[in-house]
Image (cartoon, rainbow, N blue to C red):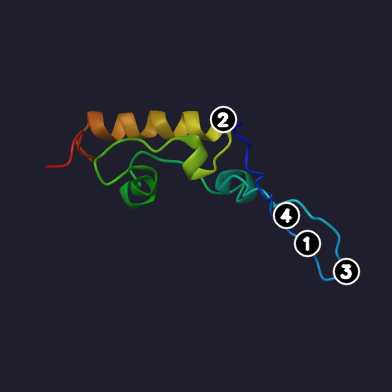
Amino acid sequence: MLQKKKQSIKSKTTQNGEWTPKRRKKCYFCINKGKEIDYKDVDGIRRYISDRGKILHRRITKNCAKHQRIISKTIKQARNIALLPYTVE
């Protein structure tokens, strides 16, 4: 019979042996309340575009849902007025 291998789950432990969960990275725009997302700020928007020109998803950028929607709208605005390319050649 086939037996399943037991997988050892590694947890983050402190020096005294207590388990602590990993801290989630917070949204950049929620931390910096004064920072606005603007379609004219091309260098700031490029952080959220892959090398192939695709919009990076929320899991990679670590943004909240509200700010990810705003980022995707600003990227589309910047593409529409030719500040950003639709595809990278």
Residue 16 numbered tag: 3
Label 4, residues with CA under 10 Å away: few <14, some 14-19, many ≥20? few
- Tell me the kind of residue under disc 3: Asn
Q: Residue furthest left?
A: 89
Q: CA distance from mark 2 to mark 3?
A: 39 Å
Residue at which label 2 appears: 66
Q: CA distance from mark 3 to mark 1?
A: 8 Å
Residue at which label 4 appears: 11
- Quarter that holds the C terminus: top left
Among the two numbered marks 2 and 1 on one chain, the one whose residue lies closer to the N terminus = 1
Among the two numbered marks 2 and 3 on one chain, the one whose residue lies closer to the N terminus = 3
Residue 53 numbered tag: none
Among the two numbered marks 4 and 2 on one chain, the one whose residue lies closer to the N terminus = 4
Among the two numbered marks 3 and 4 on one chain, the one whose residue lies closer to the N terminus = 4
Q: Secondary structure at mark 3?
A: loop
Label 2, residues with CA under 10 Å away: few <14, some 14-19, many ≥20? few
The x, y position of residue 43, in whole percent, is 33, 52
Label 1, residues with CA under 10 Å away: few <14, some 14-19, many ≥20? few
Q: CA distance from mark 3 to mark 4?
A: 14 Å
Kindly check if marks 3 and 4 are in contact, taking CB atoms under 8 A apart as contact: no
| Vertical order, 84 against 18 (above or below) | above
Q: CA distance from mark 1 to mark 4?
A: 6 Å
Residue 13 numbered tag: 1
- Tell me the kind of residue under disc 2: Lys
Compared across the picture, whether 84 is left or right of 26 comes to left
The x, y position of residue 78, in whole percent, is 29, 35
Q: Secondary structure at mark 4?
A: loop
Of the pair 78 and 14, the residue shown nearer to us: 14
Kindly check if marks 1 and 4 are in contact, taking CB atoms under 8 A apart as contact: yes
